[in-house]
Amino acid sequence: MEQSILLCFLAYTALLFGVMWLTSRKADNDSFFRGNRRSPWFVVAYGMIGASLSGVTFMSVPGGVYYGQFTYMPLVFGYVIGYAVIALLLLPLYYRLQLTSIYTYLQQRFGIHSERTGALFFVLSRLMGSALRMYLVVYVLYEFVFSSWGIPFWIPAVIFIVLILFYTLKGGLKTVVWTDMLQTTFLILAAVVTVVALLRNMNMSFGELMKHAAEGGYTRMFETDFAHPKYYWKQILAGAFITITMTGLDQDMMQKNLTCKTLRDAQKNVMTSSLLFIVVNVLFLSLGAALIYYAANTGMQLPTNAAGQVQADKIFPTIAFSLNQFTAIVFVLGMVAAGYSSADGTLTALTTTFCFDFLHFDKRGWSEARQTRIRKTAHIAFALLYLLVIIAFRPFHTQSLIDTLFDVAGFTYGPLLGLYAFGLFSKRTVHDKAVPFIAVVSPMLCYILKAKSPDWFAGYQIGFEILLINGLLTYIGLLLCSTPTTQAMPPSDSAPNH
């Protein structure tokens, strides 16, 4: 089986490089950073599904049904609200100011220290979050494929990063928009094929499966205990703000949206993505119910750790590999697609942020050739950092990675939420040099608050809402370091073209 998996991996990679060759011909820096502003909105919308899902949804959402049933869905309902805010509030701002890096807005509104603070928090958050997504892909493929060959963990990690580096180095975003579409297809295909295989093995229809899953309590969607971290209203609210921050204030996700030809196209893209996201998450949760019911129905032993606890992230691969060779191969291709989609856009966005928000190289009058050299150097450097995070995280993989991912997001995206909220809803002038201090202190206070909340609030556990608290503390800090002003935000006709 390992040889078949390797051949399919090579074939899929060759297909990606074929897409790269087609899309990167005559590519320049404008192609890398902006996709020449010519991306069809429906291609971006479909590809955004794969970029949003990645390996975390592919693995942790189905496996998470074992402990959390369908309580992930209220979070997804909140996503739709967040996407509406992005379409109606943030996208018009970004298109009006003609931004390439969305953190240029912070420089125009507050100053250069604010711009670099926002950009730095994005770099830290996206580097960690995306590397964790990529780590899960490498981890699973290593456990189920490469370890049997005696290959060290770091080798497949290096292989993935080098391949991604090669196919994004020239075309950048112009290539990523199209490869994301391909990767979305394989992610969804892997889930559908596995569900069909499970149904055939159990000789039942999908409706019968969901009926049995509901009777077993696996499809419970709403947690009604207010003190629980996954209380459904908290989930809906958190989902909305997670989307606003992790998509609307995230250079990786918004850079793809900004490649659409017009604002209207970008808005259609975002709203279409939000509806598709509901359908796809229902599919992955249903897959989780099918996996768990199949294991219970056949007496299959689920994977456990040394303490005897079921490892949710290993449920999907364990069963996929046990069904037949075809499901194993399709699963691996889905994981490979998840791995590529986690990293390609991220490397492009990190490079963009460094070039525009730290070097401001578009303002320096450098030649196209010099900008290309700097851009490629930064791209390679971020790829190396990405690889180091993946390798260094392995000893710390102790819980479902979707929980780890949202923990990271709550602490790193909170200051961005506070900064943009203050910029959009207040006309006060902030002392720019105080912004980095505020942005660091707020997450530190939130960390203490989250750790002590059960003791301080009669057992109440702070969950995803830490993001809101973090943003609120940042907003209050900015308010305290601001002065009244009648100056409006920069008008569109005076904004530099970034």
Image: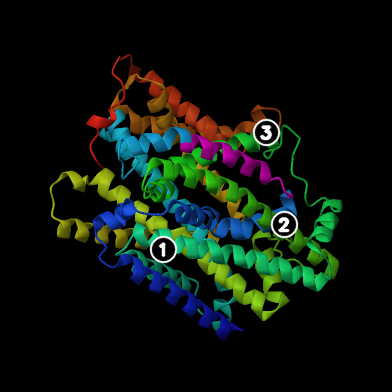
Q: Camera-side residue: 234 or 274?
A: 274
* The residue stretch that appears in magenta: 69-87
The residue under label 1 is 387
Three-letter code for the amino acid on which mark 2 is drawn: Ser
Q: Nearer the viewer, mark 1 or mark 2?
A: 2
Indicate the secondary structure of the residue bearing disc 1.
helix
Q: Is residue 73 magenta?
A: yes
Q: Position of residue 191 (x, y in %)?
A: 65, 64
Q: Nearer the viewer, mark 1 or mark 3?
A: 3
| Label disc, if present, on residue 286 of the rendered structure | 2
Instruction: Please rate how many residues cluster around mark 3, counting C-alpha atoms within 10 Å: few if below 14, some from 14 to 19, many from 20.
Output: some
Mark 3 vs 2, N-terminal side: 3
What residue is drawn where x is 66% and y is 31%? Answer: 455
Three-letter code for the amino acid on which mark 3 is drawn: Trp
Q: Position of 264 compared to 227: left or right?
A: left
Any part of residue 390 in sight: no
In this picture the colour scheme is rainbow
